[in-house]
């Protein structure tokens, strides 16, 4: 039976990428995708559990579905994503609305699980890790009317690092790399559908270690090299890389592969060695700064963004000030700041969460202010200079304006002709009065 499917996603880009694959599987079974859960008879909730708040958001949303579920015996509710592997069968106990639980590594089984649920009318769970590539390309699916120039491609999943605060190694399992041939096939296919910019995804892309069908190993730098040879691909981004194993081959890729953007997200988490050690990050601030310098040596115009956790157990004012110093020194651009949230099962869950919420909020705000200043700092540096942008579309407010993005992800509006869509062009920035988007001239 064809169903009307509503899908909602929380969490990181990997989860959103999974959602696109979930939709591919469901569409292959002739289900119809709807925008509103009121109209649906199959609701897929792709969950995240990185912080307590992500879990709350999911359970709050689920509760909103109670009346709908009570009034429609046919409605199926399925939980996918990281909460499935963290909470397992407990989800059934925590909320009786859930019919199916499907883990991140089981999404290729989803159609079967739904079929089984309908047949046997019994709650069902599959959170196994199958040793197959779950990522399929749905060639029927591409929407050619929709101008889309960039997209994500997963290259590896899972994490073996076990940072003391992090749930990901438990929810996504250990690191598994996709075969280089499968990745190249996906990128080649996308490059023929007007995708010019690829963002390679993984919990730790620099740990990528694929195996060719002839048994040879493919490292992350090998993979970057192969992807850069695909003609239509004009820009390569990747996320996320852990500073710990960002090796010299990857650094040298910046020297030889122009297509890799001069913008790198390199999560540091804290500026204090004491806290980094408690976090089990396996590098020191000295190591991090040296890595930044090595990258700047081969790419002098590189700009860095990062992640911070504020209020980690034991973070004193002195530790926090070291983080502020680091931000002032390295001038991180747009970055993510998170208030520490203890996750059951992780090592730091057993450390005393001794920084108060008020204090966490203050530290969050102080970092945010510094990062906002840095954003303005980089905007000022850009003023009256020429930058390459990939032209992505028309402005929604004024269709005379086109827009594109610089390598450091600044949206730039300019007057231009529609034949520039999809092209990499140079723009001179001439207006930085708004922090979040700029104006320029051809
Ligand atoms: N693999 C990436 C990060 C993935 S998780 C890396 O190691 O850099 C994304 C971000 O969520 C992390 O960088 C961290 O800043 C934040 N995070 C993870 N667990 C958290 C927790 N328990 N509390 C607060 N923030 C957390
Ligand atoms: Fe989490 Fe650390 Fe792995 Fe990143 S490297 S996903 S923060 S355990
Ligand atoms: Fe969340 Fe899982 Fe991503 S916990 S951040 S959806 S890997």
Image: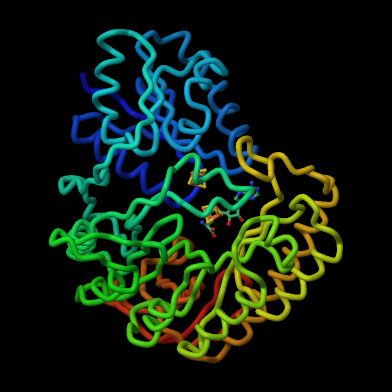
> Residue at the location (61% across, 79% down)?
432
Which quarter of the figure is the N terminus placed in? top left
> Residue at the location (49% across, 49% down)?
12
> Residue at the location (67% across, 73% down)?
285
Most foreground residue, 214 or 257: 214
> Residue at the location (72% across, 68% down)?
271
* Residue 343, x across and y down, in percent: 64, 39
Q: Is residue 436 left or right of residue 2?
A: right
Name which quarter of the figure residue 363 lies in.
bottom right
The answer to whether residue 377 is above or below residue 51 is below
Residue 401 visible in the displayed image: no
Which quarter of the figure is the C terminus placed in? bottom left
Tell how many labels.
0
Name which quarter of the figure residue 403 lies in.
bottom left
Residue 161 visible in the displayed image: yes
Name which quarter of the figure residue 190 lies in.
bottom left
Q: Is residue 64 left or right of residue 310?
A: left
Most foreground residue, 51 or 247: 247
Most foreground residue, 95 or 172: 172
The answer to whether residue 251 is above or below residue 298 is above
* Residue 211, x across and y down, in percent: 23, 60
* Residue 333, x across and y down, in percent: 61, 73
The answer to whether residue 155 is above or below residue 404 is above
């Amino acid at each position: 039976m064809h169903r009307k499917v509503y899908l909602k996603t929380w969490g990181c880009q990997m989860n959103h990428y999974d959602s696109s694959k979930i939709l591919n599987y469901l569409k292959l079974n002739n289900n119809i995708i709807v925008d509103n859960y009121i109209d649906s008879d199959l609701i897929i909730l792709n969950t995240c559990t990185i912080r307590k708040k992500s879990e709350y958001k999911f359970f709050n949303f689920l509760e909103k579905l109670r009346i709908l579920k009570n009034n429609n015996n046919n409605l199926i509710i399925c939980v996918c994503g990281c909460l499935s592997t963290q909470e397992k069968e407990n989800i059934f106990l925590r909320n009786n609305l859930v019919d199916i639980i499907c883990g991140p590594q089981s999404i290729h089984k989803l159609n079967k699980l739904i079929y089984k649920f309908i047949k046997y009318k019994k709650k069902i769970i599959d959170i196994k890790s199958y040793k197959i590539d779950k990522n399929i390309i749905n060639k029927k699916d591409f929407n050619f009317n929709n101008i889309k120039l960039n997209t994500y491609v997963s290259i590896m999943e899972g994490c073996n690092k076990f940072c003391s605060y992090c749930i990901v190694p438990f929810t996504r399992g250990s690191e598994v790399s996709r075969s280089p041939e499968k990745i190249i096939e996906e990128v080649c296919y996308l490059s023929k559908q007007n995708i010019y910019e690829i963002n390679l995804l993984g919990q730790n892309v620099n740990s990528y270690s694929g195996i060719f069908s002839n048994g040879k190993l493919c490292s992350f730098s090998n993979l970057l090299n192969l992807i850069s040879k695909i003609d239509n691909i004009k820009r390569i981004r990747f996320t996320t890389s852990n500073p710990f194993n960002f090796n010299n081959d990857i650094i040298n890729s910046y020297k030889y592969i122009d297509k890799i953007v001069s913008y790198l997200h390199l999560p540091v988490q804290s500026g204090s060695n004491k806290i980094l050690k408690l976090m089990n990050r396996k590098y020191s601030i000295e190591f991090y700064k040296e890595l930044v310098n090595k990258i700047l040596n081969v790419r002098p115009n590189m700009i860095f963004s990062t992640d911070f956790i504020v209020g980690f157990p034991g973070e004193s004012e002195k530790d926090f000030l070291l983080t502020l110093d680091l931000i002032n020194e390295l001038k991180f651009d747009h970055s993510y700041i998170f208030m520490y949230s203890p996750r059951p099962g992780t090592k730091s869950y057993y450390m005393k969460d001794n920084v108060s919420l008020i204090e966490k909020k203050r530290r969050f705000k102080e970092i945010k202010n510094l990062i906002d200043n840095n954003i303005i700092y980089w905007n000022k540096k850009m003023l009256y200079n020429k930058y390459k942008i990939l032209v992505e579309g028309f402005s929604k407010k004024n269709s005379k304006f086109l827009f594109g993005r610089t390598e450091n992800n600044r949206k730039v509006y300019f007057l231009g002709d529609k034949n520039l869509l999809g092209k990499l062009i140079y723009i001179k920035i001439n207006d930085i009065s708004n922090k979040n988007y700029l104006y320029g001239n051809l």
